[in-house]
Amino acid sequence: MPRLFGTDGIRGIANVDLKPTLAYALGRATAHRLAGQGGCIVVGQDTRRSGDMFVAAIVAGATSLGVDVHTVGVVPTPALAHITGAGHFAAGIMVSASHNPARDNGLKVLDEHGLKLDDDIEDELEQFIWRADELPGAPADALGRLVDAHDLIDLYFDHRLGLARQVKSRLHLVVDCANGSGCIVAERILSATGARVDLMFNDPDGSNINCGCGATAPTALAAEVVKLGADVGFALDGDADRLIAVDAGGCVVDGDAVLGILALDRIARDKLPNGALVVSVLSNGGLQRTIEAAGGQVIRTPVGDKNILEGMLVNGAGLGGEKSGHVIILEYATSGDGIVTALEVMAVMSRTGRSLADLATQIPMLPQQQRTIPARHKDQWEGDPVLHRAVGRAESRLGSSGRVLVRPSGTETAIRVMVEGSDEALVTELANELAVLAEERLN
């Protein structure tokens, strides 16, 4: 039986392969393993139409074991993490599929500190999920209660507004809220810096989250930044835990470039703990070369912000993240937060007086291509000798400066292929060839 939890919780098509019965079972499992009768958990959601259904199922499951459930409504994932850690909660559950389309949804469980669970705890939860009906329910007079806790978002606002007021920026921003959770917080926090903030894709209807917008589709944002003559654009994803930036000329500045900008600034100010930047195996080799040339060190982990955080804690690092736009700044948060990332980029721009495009030129990137291939049998690629030989040939053609990485997606039924090297045409050719072969072999 495949593992339920991927790199970012449990994901699936809402009401098809991710059903409310699973959310109910997760509610019971979380109540049993993390809270206990008389305890309490907090639940949030993004703007997907299916979110209400899943929240209701979680509430039913947890309260049936005598655990109170505080619901905060639509909030960013980092806001739920902050609320969970700042409150008296045994756990938090976020109903969100992050950057995925509206038809999908997901269930992310956080511990009492607002951190994603260790793999061994997730494994225990899975076992309780499979036998959720066997868990001892509470008697009628000890059932848990549903508590409306929408005002708890103020805990998040108070902290992030404090950060924003330290930036003191006069920049003109355009912010793409992805029709997601960022609509709730982006304007209020970012405008507290003194910046002018124009929003787009901030009218969620339950079905338009991440639809042609957000961190995975910043084209419309880029065009709007140029049209309005803005200084910078920021694209959040559906639950606002990642950020992709756009410079004044409409060029995309991805998570690797943002990490490089923040790391170089901190190295120059002697504010990068242990001189360490933690990134995933997908981050560009050009970023690593730049940081090492500046006297820092780059530590790589498997993909997933949970792995990034673990690498940061183990190595005493204060900054880490992924090419996709997850950025963790430990002095402010223990999870990725697109709003905090935006504030940090604005702070560097204001402090140095340099444009985002100018700052990004400090980090020359190697040509890199990534492909996502829908694959029914994504976990079987390592056992396919034809694919293995093709990867080996590609690595030989790239030489010592190149890399090929093939991995099953942790959030979708798909295979990810990444090719990096010094020859852009060759990188593109090999990425295309491997993508076609993977689709043939794994479907």
Image: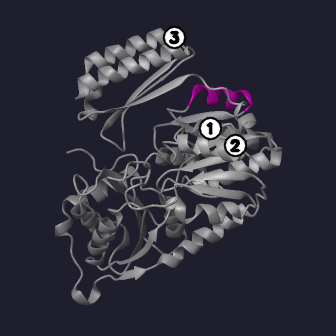
Q: Relative to 370, is 322 on the left or the right?
A: right
Q: Can residue 139 be seen by looking at this rendering?
A: yes
Residue most extreme to the bottom: 141
Q: Name the residue under label 1.
A: 253
Q: In which quarter of the image is residue 108?
A: bottom left
Question: Secondary structure under badge 3?
Answer: loop
Residue 293 shown in magenta: yes
> In the figure, is residue 62 to the left or right of 426?
left
Closest to the observer: 224 or 10?
224
Position of 399 relative to 205 (above/below) = above
Q: Where is residue 186 in the image (x, y as percent from the top left)?
A: 60, 60
Q: Earlier in the sequence, mark 3 or mark 2?
A: 2
User: Magenta segment range?
Assistant: 284-295
N-term mark: 1 or 2: 1
**Residue in the image at 42% along x and 21% along y:** 431
Compared to 418, does 304 lie above or below?
below
State the image coordinates of residue 21 (x, y, percent, origin top left). 21, 63
